Each structure stands twice: as C-alpha cells, then as structure tokens.
Image (spheres, rainbow, N blue to C red):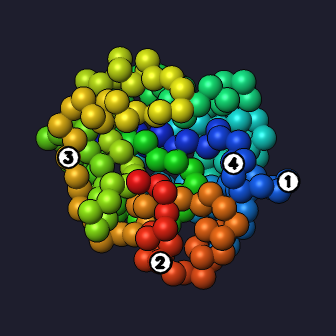
C-alpha cells in the first residue's frame, strides 16, 4: 500500500487581516477553533502531518497535535513569508512520500478532499483540489520536488513550482477547498454554514 504524503499545515502567519487581539486561528468554530477544526479534518484523513507554527499558538495546536508533530518557528522566521514556512515544514519531514500544503485557516475542507489530492500524487508531480473550476487546497507535491520546496522563500509560496510542472486538477464536490478564514465576516459565514456562498467570495484559490 502506498504511503500517504505528509500534510504541512501552515499556522505561522500573523493573521493581520482579521484584526483584534485574538488570532484568527484561535477563534471559536463549532466545538473547537479555526485551527482545531482544520487539524481535526487532517487527523480524520489519516495522513501524517506537521504543523508549522509559532510559540503563541503552540498551546492551541497541542490540543490535537503531539509535540513531535509541531515545528515551532520564531516570529522573525514567520515574517519571512509563507514560502519559508513551506520550506521549513518540508525539511522537517525529508523522508515523506510527498507533501500536501494546507493553510491552517481552512477549517471547512473535507478529509476526502485531502485524500483525493494525495492519491493523485501517485501519478503526478503536482496536484491540487479544484471546485467549480477554481483551484483550491491542499496543493500536493511529489517527493522528487524536495530540493525545490526547501528552497522556497517569501510570500509567493509554491506558485512557481506549480507553474513549472504539469499540475493535475483533482475535481472535488467540496466548497471547503476554497474557503479560508481571513476576516470576521468569513468566520461569521462559516459559523452560519453557508459554505457555497463563502466559497464564491473566498480568496483561497
């Protein structure tokens, strides 16, 4: 049986667009939090994972993730951008059978969507979820792209790698692959359960 790819959960951002003293990942959602709900879906997928986070969010992440599954970066490192966080997470799991990059602020994603993208990595170097013609998360990368992933820097993330290789779209019936929680309005809509409407206005893709 093929070994599952490792999910790199990105939870080191400042969340500045949300505003207020409480980080967006700490906001309540259902019986959990935004980050807790995201991690719950990752756990339900059965994929191994690593959470790239800062010291502030370690207590929150630790409610679902074991300490060995947390990579704590400094605030200075976090400010270097999402590319640095991806590189750090991939480097933390160098022997993984590929990596699935998933922002921690995407709590509405289905475990089945995570697994569908992982399955596509068996035949494609890069794969991503797609809902109604729009690219979403997670974005998956095969093991042979380790060197390129660990060289990432800045806020561009892995876009250049996605553009450089034949990227396979995995069509899913899951608006959650597009939904990230960036603002209080996003959170209110997620709490209300109108996922299709929220996906329409989401910037996740």
Quadrant assignment for the C terminus: bottom left
Residue at the image position 36 percent from the left and 69 percent from the top: 174
Q: Which residue is mark 3?
A: 168
Q: Earlier in the sequence, mark 4 or mark 1?
A: 4
Whether residue 98 appears in this view of the structure is no
Residue that label 1 marks: 21
- Name the residue beneath numbered marker 2: 197
Q: Residue at the location (66% across, 24% down)?
A: 77
- Which quarter of the rendering shows the N terminus? top left
Residue in view at x 69 percent, y 48 percent: 15
The crowding category of the residue bearing disc 3, from other C-alpha atoms within 10 Å (few below 14, some 14 to 19, many at least 20), is many
- Tell me: residue 6, above or below residue 39: above
Pick the front one: 64 or 164? 164
The outermost residue toward the right is 21
Question: For numbered disc 3, what is the local secondary structure?
Answer: strand
User: Marks 4 and 2: in contact by CB < 8 Å?
Assistant: no
* Mark 3 and mark 4 residues within 8 Å of each other at the beta carbon: no
Q: CA distance from mark 3 to mark 2?
A: 26 Å
**Could you give the CA–CA distance between mark 1 and mark 3, rounded to whole angstroms?**
39 Å
Residue 83 spot, x, y in % from top left:
50, 29
Residue 151, percent from left and from top: 43, 18
User: Decide: marks 3, 2 in contact (CB < 8 A)?
Assistant: no
User: Label 1, label 2: how many angstroms apart (C-alpha)?
Assistant: 27 Å
Q: Secondary structure at mark 1?
A: loop
- Residues under labels 2 and 4: Cα distance? 22 Å
């Amino acid at each position: 049986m093929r070994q599952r790819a490792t999910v790199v959960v990105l939870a080191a951002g400042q969340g500045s667009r949300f505003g207020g003293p409480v980080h967006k990942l700490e906001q309540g959602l259902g019986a959990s939090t935004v980050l807790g709900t995201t991690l719950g879906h990752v756990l339900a997928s059965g994929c191994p994972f690593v959470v790239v986070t800062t010291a502030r969010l370690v207590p929150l992440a630790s409610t679902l993730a074991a300490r060995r599954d947390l990579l704590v970066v400094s605030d200075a490192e976090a400010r270097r951008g999402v590319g640095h966080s991806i590189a750090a997470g991939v480097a933390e799991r160098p022997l993984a059978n590929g990596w699935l990059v998933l922002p921690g602020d995407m709590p509405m994603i289905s475990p089945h969507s995570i697994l569908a993208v992982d399955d596509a990595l068996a035949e494609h170097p890069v794969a991503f979820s797609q809902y109604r013609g729009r690219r979403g998360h997670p974005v998956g990368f095969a093991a042979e792209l380790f060197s390129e992933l660990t060289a990432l820097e800045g806020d561009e993330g892995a876009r250049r790698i996605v553009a450089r290789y034949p990227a396979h779209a995995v069509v899913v019936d899951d608006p959650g692959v597009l939904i990230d929680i960036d603002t209080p309005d996003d959170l209110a809509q997620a709490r209300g359960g109108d996922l299709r409407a929220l996906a329409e206005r989401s910037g996740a893709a």
